[in-house]
Image (spheres, rainbow, N blue to C red):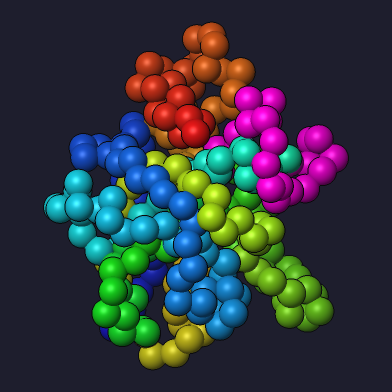
Amino acid sequence: MRPDGPRDPVAGPDQGPPTPYPIRLSGPVIKGFGRGSKELGIPTANIPADGLAAHPSLETGVYYGVAALDPARFVYEDAVSSSIATSEGGGDRKKKKVTILPAVLSIGYNPFYKNEVKSIEIHIMPPLNSPSPTSQNTKESSSEEEKDKEQFFKLPDFYSTTLNLLILGYIRPEFDYVSRDALVEDIRVDCEVARNSLERSGYACYLADDGDDETENEAGDEKGREERVWLRRF
């Protein structure tokens, strides 16, 4: 069971990902157990777990990182362009922007559901410059009607789209829970820990915008640029 007590607001060192991170995983988004969105109200994207074979020391648990989706199948356009996320069936990927988004993920068996197959379940979050739907302040200030709405960020379906994932840090081990509500609340906190962790200057280079790949800037160190190039390569 999850131990009692408050959670740390961040995970990992302030200066950036320690060894063995960043860890790269990639694969098509596949059907999972169907519980994340339907039962928990938390949309998740599953990718095949076979990529974990290259990282045998990676323990089960909850992690944070960044993710990108193949622009030939899915394009995310933020509020700056007066649009929303769109799911598309094809086209010229070179003309479409690849947006790198923050993510929180679990690797393992989900003790609450007693899964027998290891899975990678990824919850993609909104850009860090957007309001956080999982913020405690947002939750407490919402009206009763707003509280009944979805609390977790949701994108249109993007099954079969290739997803590139960069794991940047470890948050906590997997736990069992006394109730579904307790599980959902811990995942809400996971989202906030992931956001807080990624907002630090040591991690900014992994979320830098497209234009930052071309010139030097404070967030554009060589390692960060190399990983951004990989994230956007489809």
The quadrant holding residue 78 is top right
* Stretch in magenta: 78-102
Identify the residue at image location x=54%, y=9%: 215
- Front-most of residues 72 and 132: 72
- Of 119 and 28, nearer the camera is 28
Residue 135 in view here: no
Q: Is residue 37 visible?
A: yes
Q: Main secondary structure of the magenta part?
A: loop
Q: Residue furthest left?
A: 57
Which residue sits at x=31%, y=59%?
49
Q: Residue at x 81, y 35 (%)?
A: 81
- At x 85%, y 40%, the residue is 82
Question: Does 9 appear above or below 6?
Answer: above
Question: Does 133 sit left or right of 79 as displayed?
Answer: left
Q: Residue furthest right?
A: 82
Residue 92 on the magenta segment = yes
The quadrant of the picture occupied by the N terminus is bottom left
Residue 16 vs residue 99, the one in the foreground? 99
| Horizontal side of residue 50 vs 96, given as left or right | left
Residue 9 drawn at (x, y percent): 43, 55
Question: Is residue 231 located in the magenta-colored stretch of the structure?
Answer: no
Judge whether 42 appears above or below 124 on screen.
below
Residue extending farthest to the top is 215
Coordinates of residue 218 in the picture (x, y in percent): 49, 17
Q: x%, y% of residue 53?
A: 20, 52
Residue 214 sits in quarter:
top right
What is the x, y in percent for residue 40?
55, 79
